[in-house]
């Protein structure tokens, strides 16, 4: 396999580097979203029960003991006593949590765009070398030799496209997960504000 890839030329080096970087980002984000996945609707229901029953202190304690973006956003809202300050605290906490969830996703998008270009560049360089060889031999070149040079040049395109496809699929998958968690946090924060307002106004 390594000998096969090495025939692609020097531009296989940045393509292989992109593949390792993409693999690292995908694993890191999978682990991150797996951890975040433990923090969902079930947690929000427990917080709601505490808010409607025992009060804000117990709900805040639960949020502070629970890791995850939803818990931190809700804790920011419960902790703040003033309505205006509460909404700003939730928005600010939500912004930073979304930023955290989107970490490294831009890197995946860049790899998905750059990898096929590197592959194409490698193929063009390989084709230039092949045709230069033909010129040096004044056209007296075996068709098999020429075909071999061309398929070696195409290795970089195939490698670049493979890295790009995997990276692009992973990017869109993680973007979808970010949207899911963003919607969950917005919905839970809205319900939190409604419950706290009901308590304040005795509804």
Image: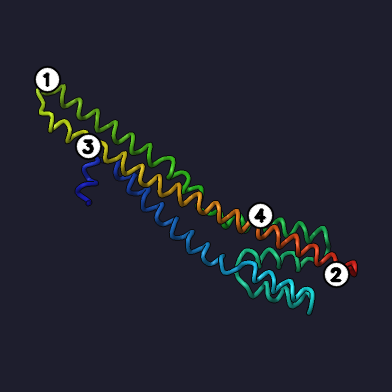
In the image: residue 78, left or right of residue 183: right
Tell me where residue 45 appears, x and y as whole percent: 69, 71
- The alpha-carbon separation of the residues under discs 4 and 2 comes to 26 Å
Nearer the observer: mark 3 or 1; the answer is: 3
Q: Which residue is mark 1?
A: 138
Give the mark, 1 or 4, whose residue is nearer the N terminus: 4
Give the mark, 4 or 2, whose residue is nearer the N terminus: 4
| Residue that protrudes farthest toward the right in the picture | 202
Give the mark, 1 or 2, whose residue is nearer the N terminus: 1
Residue at figure coordinates x 75%, y 76% from the top left? 50
The label on residue 95 is 4
As drawn, 25 above or below 76: above
Residue at figure coordinates x 68%, y 69% from the top left? 44
Classify residue 183 by image quadrant.
bottom right
- The alpha-carbon separation of the residues under discs 1 and 4 comes to 65 Å
Query: Quick one: label 2, few (<14), some, or many (20+) residues within 10 Å?
Result: few
Tell me where residue 140 appears, x and y as whole percent: 9, 23
Query: Quick one: label 4, few (<14), some, or many (20+) residues within 10 Å?
Result: few
Q: Which residue is mark 2?
A: 199
Classify residue 143 by image quadrant.
top left
As drawn, 46 above or below 37: below
């Amino acid at each position: 396999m390594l000998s096969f890839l090495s025939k692609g030329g020097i531009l296989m080096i940045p393509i292989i580097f992109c593949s390792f970087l993409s693999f690292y980002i995908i694993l890191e984000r999978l682990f991150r979203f797996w951890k975040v996945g433990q923090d969902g609707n079930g947690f929000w229901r427990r917080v709601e029960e505490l808010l409607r029953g025992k009060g804000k202190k117990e709900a805040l304690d639960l949020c502070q003991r629970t890791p995850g973006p939803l818990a931190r956003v809700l804790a920011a809202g419960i902790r703040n006593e003033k309505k205006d300050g509460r909404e700003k605290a939730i928005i600010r906490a939500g912004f930073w949590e979304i930023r955290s969830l989107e970490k490294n996703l831009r890197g995946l998008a860049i790899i998905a765009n750059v990898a096929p270009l590197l592959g194409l560049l490698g193929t063009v360089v390989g084709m230039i070398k092949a045709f230069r060889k033909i010129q040096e031999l004044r056209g007296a070149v075996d068709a098999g030799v020429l075909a071999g040079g061309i398929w070696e040049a195409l290795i970089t395109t195939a490698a670049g496209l493979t890295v790009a496809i995997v990276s692009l699929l992973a990017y869109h998958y993680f973007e979808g997960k970010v949207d899911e968690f963003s919607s969950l946090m917005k919905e839970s924060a809205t319900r939190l504000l409604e419950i706290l307002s009901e308590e304040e106004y005795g509804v």
